[in-house]
Image (cartoon, rainbow, N blue to C red):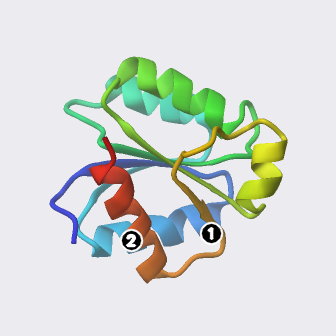
Amino acid sequence: MGNGETILIVEDEKAILELLEAMLLQLGYSVVTASLPSRALALAKEHDGLIHLLITDVVMPEMNGRELARQIKALYPQIRLLFMSGYTANVIAHQGVLDQGVQFIQKPFSMQKIAARVDTALKQQ
């Protein structure tokens, strides 16, 4: 499915981070992982080449996913975004963390579901 596009995953729960990394590698993507937003920003600054997609948890230590996405987008203006959370999209939207129309996936998710969401996010204009 993937064509080697680089995906940055930011997730503070180690088991979920490792599972998502394994899924995306199996789907043919290049993956960079971080367990904290500060580490993700450092990796993004050091990375050679494009980062095509940021997949970030919405609720994390240090800063929320929306703020992280804003800072990563300043480094990579063309980057696509996919937010994930154990909370429903409605709950998160009501807290003002996500804007209407953003790509979102609720945890837990299947390989099939993440494959489809990543594909949609990468194709988004």
Q: Residue at x 84, y 41 (%)?
A: 95
Q: Quadrant of residue 69?
A: top right
Looking at the image, residue 8 sits to the left or right of residue 34; the answer is left
Residue type highlighted by circle 1 = Ala
Give the residue furthest to the left.
3
Q: x, y (%) of residue 84?
A: 61, 56
- Label of residue 15 in the image: 1
- Label of residue 116 in the image: 2
Viewer-proximal residue, 46 or 69? 69
- Give the class, few, some or many, for how many residues have Cα within 10 Å of label 1's Cα (few <14, many ≥20): few
The tag earlier along the polypeptide, 2 or 1, is 1
- Give the class, few, some or many, for how many residues have Cα within 10 Å of label 2's Cα (few <14, many ≥20): few
Viewer-proximal residue, 5 or 34? 5
Image height of 45 relative to 14, above or below: above
Q: Nearer the viewer, mark 2 or mark 1?
A: 2
Secondary structure at numbered mark 2? helix
Residue type highlighted by circle 2 = Ala
Q: Is residue 22 visible?
A: no
Image quadrant containing the C terminus: top left
Q: Is residue 11 visible?
A: yes
Q: x, y (%) of residue 34?
A: 52, 45
Q: Residue at x 71, y 57 (%)?
A: 89
Q: Quadrant of residue 3?
A: bottom left
Q: x, y (%) of residue 120?
A: 36, 59
Viewer-proximal residue, 38 or 117? 117
Q: x, y (%) of residue 51?
A: 30, 38
Q: Are marks 2 and 1 in contact (CB under 8 Å)?
A: no
